Image: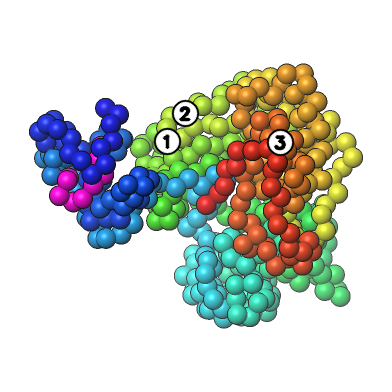
């Protein structure tokens, strides 16, 4: 049945029309200007059967109907986060200490001291995401000395965005960093006068040094990975999320690191619908990896709970710019387009859509040149959905070119964490308005 009577009664008996779920005593926005607000809603077979007052619901309640009293709260449709690293996040969630919304560094350090005291030997304390130094009254990062005082024995790794990380003495030792450890490409191990690492790591500008150090920390075993993922999904549900699109990421290998969500999906234990992407991990082998995956699986494989969307958010490492707004824009190699074009061509020839991480308009313009060349060969059909992720400095001209190719933009809330650094470097400018309309998928 497709009728949606608002505030009306469905004729017939309750038994015939019993809803699966009735939510009453709620605030419901109907979208109907004649009667914008409802108090109760009946749902049958995944479809809204009626919206109205509590008393209208009698006809929809049968013996098997689940009746929920919303206690006067607002009811909204499930929210989707269009850019989340939910698979990787789930594997580590219970290992993290979260500083979301903590108002002072002093309080953050007290939490850290408490967490270190209950952390099993061999494990690390890690503060990874969801916070920035700007949220603290002190407006600064913790020092290495403060981490040492809070956790003299337990390794502590504090990540600040994709800008820097602070490690205590125990973490430097556990990571094996000494005065003989060379700086990785695009990263800096800050050193004292004697050449020994101080505990500060800088993305300069590549964040690889940060997450490759975190990757040295012990991981959970199979069952614990499932428990951790379920906790993470429950936490997301608390914010109203019922689905997310996973953007994959560094150290998220296919198929190995997708095993936990696949097992949970098979057991009916996912509480969040996930559409996922595949992200080549090894520089120089990206096109080979994509070709291998194209032979293994296809977009839309899976079910309504766990489904493959396409490739990304990186297609090739050399084409990825880094969003460390505390540092100048990285200059990408002069010829990244060679492998990048092969990757995009391969995907488009095989009906794979993709999402593409790109922060700066300089990168987006180079990518668009490749897309326009392939589009001229007929390789950008309407059915293959693709988008740019992030695009903080995108120009109006580039938005027009994206729209002309049938692509989309996915914007995120990164500036709520890095806004101060961005404004210091680029100033405040109104976001560009596309002159043609482009679909825009915005994240929660
Ligand atoms: Zn990204």
Q: CA distance from mark 1 to mark 3?
A: 30 Å
Viewer-nearest residue: 241 or 18? 18
Q: Position of residue 133 (x, y in %)?
A: 64, 71
User: How far apart are the alpha carbons under marks 3 and 2?
Assistant: 29 Å
Q: How far across and down, in percent of the image, does residue 36 sit?
A: 34, 50
Contact, CB < 8 Å: mark 1 with mark 3? no
* Residue 62 image point, x, y percent: 12, 39
Q: Give the foreground label among 1 and 3.
A: 3
Q: Which residues are magenta?
A: 49-57
User: Could you tell me which secondary element the residue under label 3 belongs to?
Assistant: helix
Q: Which residue is mark 2?
A: 302
**Lower position in the chain sequence, tag 3 or tag 2:** 2
At horizontal 52% and vertical 61% (from top left) the residue drawn is 96
- Whole-number angstrom distance, CA of label 1 to CA of label 2: 8 Å
Q: SS class of the residue under badge 2?
A: loop
Say whether marks 1 and 2 touch (CB < 8 Å): yes
Residue 261 shown left or right of residue 297 in the figure:
left
Tell me which numbered mark, 1 or 3, is placed earlier along the sequence.
1
Q: Is residue 53 magenta?
A: yes
Label 1: which residue? 305
Mark 3 crowd level (few <14, some 14–19, many ≥20, 10 Å Cα): many
Q: Nearer the viewer, mark 3 or mark 2?
A: 3
Q: Which residue is mark 3?
A: 402
Q: Nearer the viewer, residue 29 or 131?
A: 29
């Amino acid at each position: 049945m497709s009728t949606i009577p608002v505030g009306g009664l469905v004729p017939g008996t309750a038994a015939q029309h019993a809803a699966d779920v009735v939510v009453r005593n709620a605030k419901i926005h109907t979208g109907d200007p004649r009667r914008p607000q409802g108090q109760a809603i009946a749902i049958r077979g995944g479809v809204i059967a009626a919206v109205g007052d509590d008393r209208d619901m009698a006809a929809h309640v049968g013996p098997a109907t689940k009746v929920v009293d919303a206690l006067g709260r607002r009811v909204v449709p499930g929210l989707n986060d269009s850019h989340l690293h939910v698979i990787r996040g789930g594997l580590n969630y219970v290992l993290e200490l979260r500083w979301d919304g903590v108002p002072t560094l002093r309080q953050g350090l007290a939490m850290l001291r408490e967490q270190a005291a209950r952390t099993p030997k061999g494990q690390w304390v890690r503060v990874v995401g969801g916070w920035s130094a700007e949220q603290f009254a002190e407006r600064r990062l913790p020092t290495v000395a403060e981490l040492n005082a809070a956790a003299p024995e337990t390794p502590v790794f504090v990540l600040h965005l994709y800008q820097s990380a602070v490690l205590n003495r125990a973490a430097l030792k556990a990571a094996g960093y000494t005065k003989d450890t060379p700086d990785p490409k695009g990263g800096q191990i800050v050193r004292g006068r004697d050449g020994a690492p101080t505990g500060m790591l800088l993305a300069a500008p590549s964040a690889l040094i940060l997450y490759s150090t975190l990757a040295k920390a012990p991981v959970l075993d199979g069952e614990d990975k499932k428990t951790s993922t379920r906790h993470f999904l429950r936490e997301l549900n608390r914010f109203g999320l019922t689905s997310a699109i996973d953007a994959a990421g560094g150290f998220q290998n296919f198929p190995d690191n997708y095993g936990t969500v696949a097992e949970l999906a098979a057991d009916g234990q996912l509480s969040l619908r996930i559409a996922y992407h595949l992200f080549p991990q090894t520089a120089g082998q990206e096109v080979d990896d994509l070709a291998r995956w194209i032979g293994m699986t296809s977009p839309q494989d899976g079910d309504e709970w766990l489904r493959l969307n396409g490739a990304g958010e990186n297609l090739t490492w050399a084409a990825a710019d880094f969003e460390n707004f505390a540092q100048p824009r990285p200059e990408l190699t002069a010829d990244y387009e060679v492998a990048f074009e092969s990757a995009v061509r391969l995907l488009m020839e095989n009906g794979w859509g993709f999402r593409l991480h790109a922060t700066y308009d300089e990168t987006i313009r180079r990518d668009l040149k490749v897309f326009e060349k392939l589009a001229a060969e007929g390789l950008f059909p309407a059915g293959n959905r693709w988008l740019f992720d992030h695009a903080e400095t995108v120009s109006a001209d580039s938005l027009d070119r994206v729209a002309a190719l049938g692509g989309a933009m996915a914007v995120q809330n990164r500036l709520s964490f890095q806004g101060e650094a961005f404004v210091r470097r680029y100033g405040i400018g109104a976001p560009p308005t596309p002159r043609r309309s482009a679909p825009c998928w915005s994240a929660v």
